[in-house]
Amino acid sequence: MTLLQKPFRALVIGSSGTIGSALVSTLQMHSNCAEVMGIHRGSIPSIDYADPSTIATAAEALAAHRPFDLIIN
């Protein structure tokens, strides 16, 4: 059973690391994935759990986009 059957949007938090970048690549190849967005310390918006202000800033920036169907942290 495929859980995400319709075209879906995905967000990968921590997409610059080994696992995160592999997840982004895999999702980009998925036939039902319409869009993959990855964020990390060097992206715009950036996110760094050591700096709580970046979490709020990233959340505000991402709220301007359509909702994500899949979020991987």
Image (cartoon, rainbow, N blue to C red):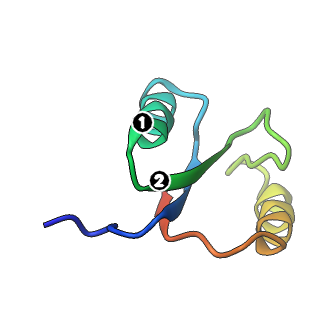
Q: Position of residue 39 (x, y in %)?
A: 69, 45
Label 1 and label 2: CA atoms lie apart by 8 Å
Q: Report if the CB atoms under discs 1 and 2 are less than 8 Å apart.
A: yes
Query: Residue 68: which quarter of the image?
Result: bottom right
Query: Residue 16: which quarter of the image?
Result: top right
Question: Which residue is disc 1 drawn over?
Answer: 29
User: Element at badge 1?
Assistant: helix
What residue type is disc 1 on?
Met
Q: Position of residue 22 (x, y in %)?
A: 43, 29
What residue type is disc 2 on?
Cys
Residue plotted at (74% across, 49% down) = 47
Q: What is the number of the mark on residue 12?
A: none
Q: What is the number of the mark on residue 33?
A: 2
Q: Looking at the image, which is closer to me, 32 or 14?
A: 32
Q: Position of residue 69 (x, y in %)?
A: 50, 71
Q: Would you place residue 3 above or below residue 30 in this image?
A: below
Q: Would you place residue 60 above or below residue 15 in this image?
A: below
Q: Residues within 10 Å of mark 2 (few under 14, many from 20)?
A: some
Residue plotted at (43% across, 43% down) = 27
